[in-house]
Image: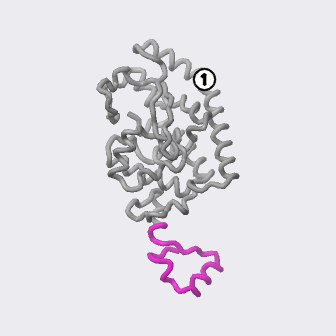
Amino acid sequence: MVSPEPETVPPVLRESWAGSGIRLVGEVEFLERLSGRVDLDALEPSWLETARGAHMTRGEALVSRSFDVVVSLGLLLLTLPLTALAALAIRLDSPGPVFYRQARVGKRGKIIHLTKLRSMRTDAEAGGAPQWATRRDPRVTRVGRFLRLTRIDEIPQVLNVLKGDMAFIGPRPERPAFVEQLSQVIPHYADRAVVKPGITGWAQVNFPYGASVEDARQKLTYDLYYVRRRSLFLDLLILVATVRVILFQEGSR
């Protein structure tokens, strides 16, 4: 049952409902569950104290790590021939290395180095300053465009998962310069770093690729929903939804 302010309901009535198996929730929580995203303006400063993702038990952490290892090893073995073909195509298509590593912000602000198949020219950031990817980005190579559409370029990140720097499911790791910029203008942006970043996540299956501050704000509403309600069931739901995203090529650039 929904109430704008559950605490205003008389205790006797609340106890009666509880005895009947009826749970009273506030309007904010009801809308959050309905939409699958949080209202950033409604988050209290202490909201992380009750966030499931920020307070995993040892058992939950063990299950989560086992899930990451099993899924990552399975994906690595299944896609090994595909990755080898992609590496050959990159080598033939444009000069430069097959793989590239890039600094990203991991759990609790730790800098990690993410590994991907190269999909852009080697001079993509010749000026040295990080740039948002854009629709039909001219820096993307011919092979790279296909790799991005199919998400094949993301496969090597399973090595980061096996190493423990990332989880399979979680907020996407962002570049340090962007994190610094976005943390200054978007409330609670730094809160997404209380969990490990992931190869795919709740924001990735619910929101298209973001390339602006406003896009980052919208994606954060999904990332923090995941942090608040993280569970094995939600991880499995995201895993299934990721297959849909890949098959229909949603949100790639």
Residue 93 or 248: which is nearer the viewer?
93
Quarter-of-image position of residue 139: top left
Q: Which percent across, then down, holds residue 184?
A: 34, 50
Residue 121 or 25: which is nearer the viewer?
121
Mark 1 residue element: helix
Q: Which percent across, then down, holds residue 101?
A: 47, 27
Q: Which percent across, then down, holds residue 6?
A: 50, 77
Q: Is residue 9 magenta?
A: yes
Residue at the spot 41% in from the left edge and 49% down from the top edge: 219
Q: Is residue 167 magenta?
A: no
Q: Which percent across, then down, holds residue 231?
A: 60, 53
Residue at the spot 48% in from the left edge and 64% down from the top edge: 46
Q: Quadrant of the C terminus?
A: top left
- Span shown in magenta: 1-29
Crowding at mark 1 (Cα within 10 Å: few <14, some 14-19, many 20+) = few
Q: Which residue is mark 1?
A: 80
For this view, does 112 lie left or right of residue 144? right
Residue 10 lies, with reference to residue 244, above or below; the image says below
Residue 243 lies, with reference to residue 28, above or below; the image says above
Residue at the spot 56% in from the left edge and 33% down from the top edge: 160
For this view, does 12 lie left or right of residue 248? right
The amino acid on which the numbered mark 1 sits, given as a three-letter code, is: Leu
Residue at the spot 31% in from the left edge and 25% down from the top edge: 138
Residue 116 or 185: which is nearer the viewer?
185
For this view, does 217 lie left or right of residue 153? left
Residue 190 or 66: which is nearer the viewer?
190
